[in-house]
Image (cartoon, rainbow, N blue to C red):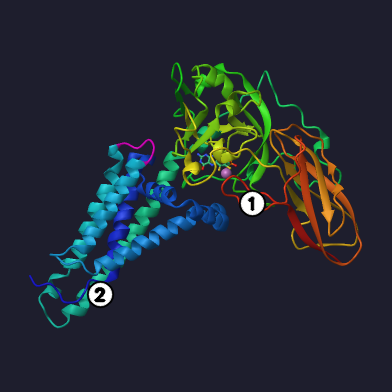
Amino acid sequence: MVETATRPSPWIGVAAAAVALGVAQLTAVAFGPHADSRTAVGSAVVDLTPGPVKEWAIQSFGTSDKLALSIVVLVVVAVIAAITAQYETRRRPVGSVAIVVAGVLGCAAVVSRAGATPVDVVPTLIGTVCGVLVLRWLVAGRFAAPEAAEGSSSAEPDRGRRLSMVTFGLIGVGAVTGVAGALLNRLNSSVADDRTAFTLPTPKGTPAPVVPPGVQPAGFTQTPFITPNADFYRIDTALSVPQVSRGDWRLRIHGMVDREVTLSFDDLQRFELVEQIVTLTCVSNPVGGDLISNAKWTGYRVRDLLAEVGIHADADMVLSTSVDGFTAGTPVEALTDQRDSLLAIGMNDAPLPTEHGYPARLVVPGLYGYVSATKWLAELELTRFDRAEAYWTKLGWSARGPIKTESRIDVPRQGAEVPRGATTFGGVAWAQHRGITAVEVRVDDGPWQPAQLGTSYSNDTWRLWSFPWQAETPGPHEIAVRATDSTGTVQTPDEADVVPDGATGWHTVSFDVQ
Ligand SMILES: Nc1nc2c(c(=O)[nH]1)N[C@H]1C(S)=C(S)[C@@H](COP(=O)(O)O)O[C@H]1N2
Ligand SMILES: [Mo]
């Protein structure tokens, strides 16, 4: 047999890769969520991406950052497959080797995920084998019809047409099996039904204190004191939202303890259910940003859970781990003192939404989410700050994350046109676990003037403010805000970046009086 002088078409490589990915995706349905190599590879890429790049991706793509990542990965795979396939010959299988290497990397990604077992690599292996077979077969071109193989003058164009039809047909097969597999995987693992079937119990002992109407200051309603679940900010590294049913959920508490325990969701019923309103904040929230929200959380005191294990005196950190491998390191005292940190199962009177950690997550007043608020919680390990490092700390963020005193202007918006006459500005201020005692506003070069404060609900929640103003002089104006916390500290004007432990500076907004 003579090898043809012409190079195989790049599309043959794309077809082989498409079949490999599609078959792997579809067979993964039979093996369960851990066998999904697409999610595993994506998650591995997220984990291996340097911190600053991640930060940039979150800032520029927001919640679509994962979609952007999937597209990038698919394009990279297609390009590599297209290039290597052109060098595939019977004796030097460059393209096949590329597919095998990709398959091995895929398997490595699968087994590296929390909860995966060696069997979970089977779909990836099957996909890899199919990809290689398709590539070898297309390059050899033996599917040509017998009459075309005779070597008549019309055989070559005919063979070429047939080859491209088969190639594009296989790309279609790959796309269809891939999409079908992804959808079936999602349907299969969805806990939507489990969540719908769950009626959040009502706390008998300690309901949250009633929210007084005064939390909303005069003339300012644009930002509600309680953020509806649908508007609550969301930040996580999960490529697809982890699906954990109540039946599957386990919490293992171990490490520097007298006796390790593992709790099921039903086991939680022996603890007292309490409610608390707590404002969550992300360390990546820039000055003026919206990565802060306030909700009523229903859950169990972490203190009560930890009392069962007997914490060793020299343990100073609780390393919490999510089913997706995310970790946070929280000082032991923040989880055991009177602030009542929660293992939350409810958010604003509903079961936790899946993307906010169903069925259970941590909520710790006073600390940024990255060091405390682990969603889809699976483990609490008692350890020490000099022994363990959590997810974002490894990437250069600070090990401790107390929330900085900050404030934000919500009205007017940047660039707003304000009609002449009486108007009311407003916004929020926060210093969780210390509390806000004053907010001041400065318009243009005027003096700092006290804003009206909404009633303080607790030191662990944000405080809303409003400021009545007479819009008189047409043209551009600027408003700035600063808060004071209960320690007497006035919010600093010094501008700090979000890395390593949260942004600082005064939020200023430019607007025009008409
Ligand atoms: N499993 C998991 N939990 C997580 C994270 C994550 O990436 N994975 N991100 C943390 C960060 S950085 C923040 S700010 C809060 C955000 O919680 P929310 O999405 O419910 O607002 O969740 C925390 N818990
Ligand atoms: Mo965060």
Residue lying at 57% horizontally and 55% vertically, measured from the top left: 59
Residue 483 in view in this figure: yes
- Counting residues from the N terminus, which is met first, the one under dot 1 or under dot 2? 2
Give, as a three-letter code, the residue at label 1: Ala
Question: What is the x, y in percent for residue 14?
Answer: 31, 64
Asked where in the image residue 2 lies, by quadrant, the reply is bottom left
Residue 389 in the image, given as x and y percentages of width and height: 46, 37
Q: In this view, which residue lies farthest toward the left?
A: 1
Tell me the residue at 25%/48% (across/down).
126
The numbered disc on residue 463 is none
Residue marked by disc 1:
496
The residue tagged with tag 2: helix, strand or loop?
helix
Q: Toward which corner of the image does residue 165 lie, by quadrant?
A: bottom left
Q: Quadrant of the C terminus?
A: bottom right
- Identify the mark at residue 161; answer none if there is no mark: 2
- Can you tell which of label 1 and label 2 is closer to the viewer? 1
Q: Residues within 10 Å of mark 1 (few under 14, many from 20)?
A: some
Asked whether residue 360 appears in the rendered view, the answer is no
Q: Is residue 74 left or right of residue 327?
A: left
Q: Is residue 469 left or right of residue 383?
A: right
Q: Where on the picture, by quarter, is residue 62? A: bottom right
In the image, residue 412 lies in the stretch drawn in magenta: no
| Image height of 249 relative to 92, above or below | above
Q: Is residue 382 left or right of residue 122?
A: right
Give the residues drawn in magenta, as a range.
Answer: 113-117
Residue at horizontal 36%, vertical 54%? Answer: 178
Spot the residue most to the bottom.
153
Q: Which x, y percent locates residue 145? A: 16, 70
Residue 459 position, x and y percent, is: 73, 32
The main secondary structure of the magenta stretch is loop
Report whether 278 appears left or right of 344. right
